[in-house]
Amino acid sequence: MHDTKVTTDVMNPDCIVIGYNEIDFAEHARRKRAEKGKSGGYHDLLTNSVLLGGERRTYMDLLNIVRERTTGCPSRLSAFELPSLGVAYLTSFLRRRGFSAAPVNSFNSATEQLREMLAGSPRAVAITTTYYVYDEPIQQIVRFVREQNPDVPIIVGGPRIQNLCSDQSPESRDGRLRPLGADIYINSTQGEDTLAAVLAALRDKGGDLSRTPNLIYRDPAAPDGPMLHTLTTVENNDLDENAVDWSYFDPSYYAPTAYMRTSRSCSFGCAFCNYPALAGPLNLSDLSTIEKELRYLCDHGVRNLIFVDDTFNVPLPRFKKICRMMIENKFDLKWISFFRCSNADDEAFDLMAEAGCTAVFLGIESGDQRILKNMTKFAKTDRYEYGIRELTRRGIATLASIIVGFPGETEESVKNTVAFLNRTQPTFYNVMLYYHDVLAPIENQREKYGIVGSGYAWRHSTMSWQEATDWKDYLVRNVNGPALMPGYGLSLWTLPYLLANGMTMEETVEFIKGASRLVIKGLDTDYLDPEPEIEEILRGLAAVRDGAGQGASS
């Protein structure tokens, strides 16, 4: 397990940093189902899960069933066993500044550890919100903390808070934040420096937060009254100075599979994405910083790495330098990353393969050139096709991420995307229903595209969300060859974790193809006997293993 302590007294830390809370997926699906006539949210869930009997479950749930049938032993694989980069980064950041910080990597697997720490006298609890798109996981953690220690201040920050607060009046912000139940909210694109300032105020200033910027917090004198707002300032935390110092952690926390970041933000401006506007200009770590961190990780048992940079191969010359540096140092890492085919050449493909790249996430979004133009992708489908072919030729697995329903989408454009996937044959693909983010650049083109509504409940001049769900089903049923990979539970980012737990890439592909068949069978029903498909998956995996054994013996 990864929930080990840092080298500090974890019973009475200045801050407990709590990572991801994986809520019960079946229960979440039941609640989303009640909304299926109002928006496309439930339907998007259908192609990101499998139907086992009458319950919606994740691919990882299915994999654990398959592994138990194969081995006869319990299987409890979870992607959230991987070390949370957000938790590691904040813990390292605070320790560098003299605060004792205790990481709780996964709320679910470290409940008892957290209970023990809360029974002591922690100065504060900080909850990260990376990956959350709704509030329930945060609320569950807050309730647990309150039950164990009603007096400890609870601080919440990160992307979910930033999204809840964006373009809102103070009154609207209060209304959105208060149901979360915390005491202090950090509203900043970065926020780590603000967190350190909050801890300093709690320790040295009697809890007076009025001079700490970027805060929205409950008034201690009137906890049910209006929340207090402090001055907003822009943080600019240097990536080189604040790279994770892994020496604060026992290697069992991060080895053999870890996450790493070498940049912040994205230099592109896709019309559907608000991340560059929120994160600011692209900021890059120096090559020497990257080399130092990689060397430490490799020397302490890391063999699989997940680069989380949104555009790892941008700028291209820097990407090549990173690959050459990894090759020259003989780091012997297997790694995955985001990748832009439109920003690569043959030399880059060769270097990344030699440097140990095993898989890449490709933000293809559409196989129709007109839709790519609407999305401001600045990419050509022929370049995508070339990139997938060259990556595959070098043994690098590819995932093509697709959006259905973007403004301008038509029957023709969806069919062009299906033809593109069938022609290029990426290893995996995923498909998402278009989500209209009112903070993304596309919001400024409402009139142009006739956009009405937001989130998963929208329509525009060429399609409604209801029509888009039908076309999403059409795509899933008509793509032949690539395996449908979900965005939750078992995604491309779990491949290194699965490899570290004994699965081969061939076995993983075979399993995901079997799960894909279950997805299609579960699109039009609320109950499905999974046994025939589970048996088919078991036979397929056995055939893969037999083939591998015969290949080795020959």
Image (tube, rainbow, N blue to C red):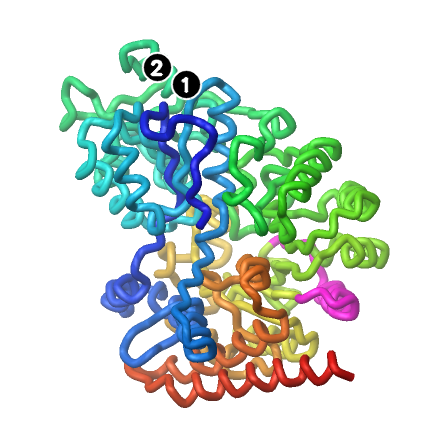
Could you say where residue 328 lies in the image, as x and y percent from the top left? 83, 44
Q: Residue furthest right?
A: 347
Q: Amino acid at mark 1?
A: Ala
Name the residue located 42 percent from the left edge and 70 percent from the top edge.
64
Check contact, mark 2 vs mark 1: CB within 8 A: yes
Picture coordinates of residue 506, whole percent (x, y): 63, 74
- Please give the name of the residue rendered at 44% of the width and 41% of the height, measured from the top-left corner: 4
Local SS, label 1: helix
Q: CA distance from mark 2 to mark 1?
A: 6 Å
The answer to which of 399 and 290 lies nearer the viewer is 290
Residue 269 seen from this side: no
Q: Position of residue 180 (x, y in %)?
A: 25, 40
Where is residue 216, by image quadrant?
Answer: top left
Residue drawn at point x = 18 percent, y = 31 percent:
150
Query: In the figure, is residue 94 to the left or right of 223?
Result: right
Q: Quadrant of residue 45?
A: bottom left
**Up-down relation of residue 302 to residue 429 (above or below):** above
Quadrant of residue 479 in the image? bottom right
Query: Residue at label 1?
Result: 197
- Residue behind mark 2: 201
Identify which residue, 154 or 245, lies in the foreground.
245
> As rendered, which of 550 and 38 lies closer to the eye?
550
Q: Nearer the viewer, residue 502 or 528?
A: 502
Quadrant assignment for the C terminus = bottom right
* Residues drawn in magenta: 376-397
Q: Is residue 427 left or right of residue 69?
A: right
Residue type at numbered disc 2: Ala
Label 2: which secondary element = helix
Question: Magenta includes 343?
Answer: no
Q: Name which residue lies at 58% across and 51% down.
A: 257
